[in-house]
Image (tube, helix red, strand yellow):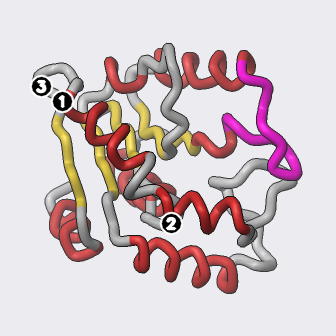
Amino acid sequence: MQRVAILGPAGAGKSELARELAARTGLPAVHLDVVFWRPGWTPAPRDEAAAELACAVAEERWILDGNFLGDGDARFERADTVVFLDLPRRTCLRRVLRRLVRDRRHVRADLPAGCREGLDLPLLRWIWRYPRTDRPRVLALLGRLPAGVDVLHIRSPRELQRHLAGV
């Protein structure tokens, strides 16, 4: 495990998993929210974000946490491990609400500078619609991965803990 891509909806635990894997393996974690967003949750210029992502993917060792499924993204061609956190909607919603309370006065390393943890209608919609809209795209992507890529399709927090115990 040298190049790990982590996917899943908001609240699935992508950033937490990236931090845990980084601590256990020594791999550097790159949080894609930091790459694709600017202060005030303004989208980063597309060419800037793409260049920053390409630099991260060109490294020999990394953990990339976040979806941002776009054209020309080589992370899945280079990844040796892809983790899809396919957790139930209710779990993701509960976790988003919990971290909103937990992190309300804290700066998180996985968020861009000038962006605070928040809860808004677009985020709730994304979580609610994820199983119907983004999940099929992720499953199709997983089906097209090159041979030899280790795919972990995690469907519950307990299943994730079992996999982590082996790392």
The answer to which quarter of the image holds residue 143 is: top left
Residue drawn at (51%, 18%) of the image: 71
The answer to which quarter of the image holds residue 86 is: bottom left
Q: Quadrant of the C terminus?
A: bottom left
Q: In the rendered structure, which disc, 2 or 3, sits on the residue that comes first in sequence?
A: 2
Q: Secondary structure at mark 3?
A: loop
Which amino acid, by three-letter code, is at mark 1? Answer: Val
Q: Is residue 126 magenta?
A: no
Disc 3 versus disc 1: distance between alpha carbons? 4 Å
Q: Is residue 37 magenta?
A: yes
Q: Is residue 118 left or right of residue 152?
A: right
Q: Secondary structure at mark 1?
A: loop
Disc number at residue 148?
A: 3
Disc 2 versus disc 3: distance between alpha carbons? 32 Å
- Residue 118 vertical position relative to residue 2 in the rendered view, above or below: below
Q: Which residues are magenta?
A: 35-46
Callout 3–callout 1 Cβ contact below 8 Å: yes
Disc 1 versus disc 2: distance between alpha carbons? 29 Å
Q: Is residue 46 visible?
A: yes
Q: Badge 2, how many Cα within 10 Å: few under 14, some, many 20+?
A: some
Q: Badge 1, how many Cα within 10 Å: few under 14, some, many 20+?
A: some
Callout 1–callout 2 Cβ contact below 8 Å: no
Disc number at residue 149?
A: 1
Q: Is residue 112 left or right of residue 2?
A: right
Disc number at residue 128?
A: 2
Residue drawn at (68%, 36%) of the image: 36
Q: Nearer the viewer, mark 2 or mark 3?
A: 2
Q: Secondary structure at mark 2?
A: helix
Callout 2–callout 3 Cβ contact below 8 Å: no
